[in-house]
Amino acid sequence: INNMKLLKLYATWCKPCVELSEMLAEHSIPHESIDVDSLDGEGMVSKYNVRALPTLLKFDDDNNLLDTLVGCPGTKEELMKFIYASN
């Protein structure tokens, strides 16, 4: 994943968040995770207007938000399409 960063906003009590974490791990997709119940997480929820979990944010190298994926994708293909789609 060149010129891009992924940030996963999640909660420990969120089952779809666990499913997304497993999907990212299974496919060795590098990402940063922030628990929305933490201080950092609360700031991110507010900054990016997060309304549902999990939320995956895609940024370019300059930290410009490129795209947002809300919820856990149903398939690996859906996840890969989000990650690799050009914006």
Image: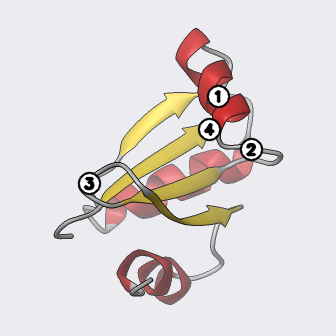
Q: Name the amino acid, label 1.
A: Thr
Q: Name the amino acid, label 2.
A: Val
Observer-nearest of 59 and 6:
59
- C-beta proximity under 8 Å, tags 4 and 1: yes
Element marked by disc 2: loop
Please give the count of numbered marks on the rendered protein. 4
Q: Name the amino acid, label 4.
A: Tyr
N-terminal-most mark, 2 or 4: 4
Determine the CA span between mark 3 and mark 1.
19 Å
Q: Which residue is mark 4?
A: 10
Q: Which residue is mark 2?
A: 50
On residue 12, which mark appears?
Answer: 1
Are there few (<14), some (14-19), or many (20+) residues within 10 Å of tag 2?
A: some
Q: Which residue is mark 3?
A: 30
Instruction: Tell me the residue at 44%/47% (across/down).
Output: 7
Pair 2/4: label in front:
2
N-terminal-most mark, 4 or 3: 4
On residue 70, which mark appears?
Answer: none
Pair 4/1: label in front:
4
* Quadrant occupied by the C terminus: bottom left
Determine the CA span between mark 4 and mark 1.
7 Å
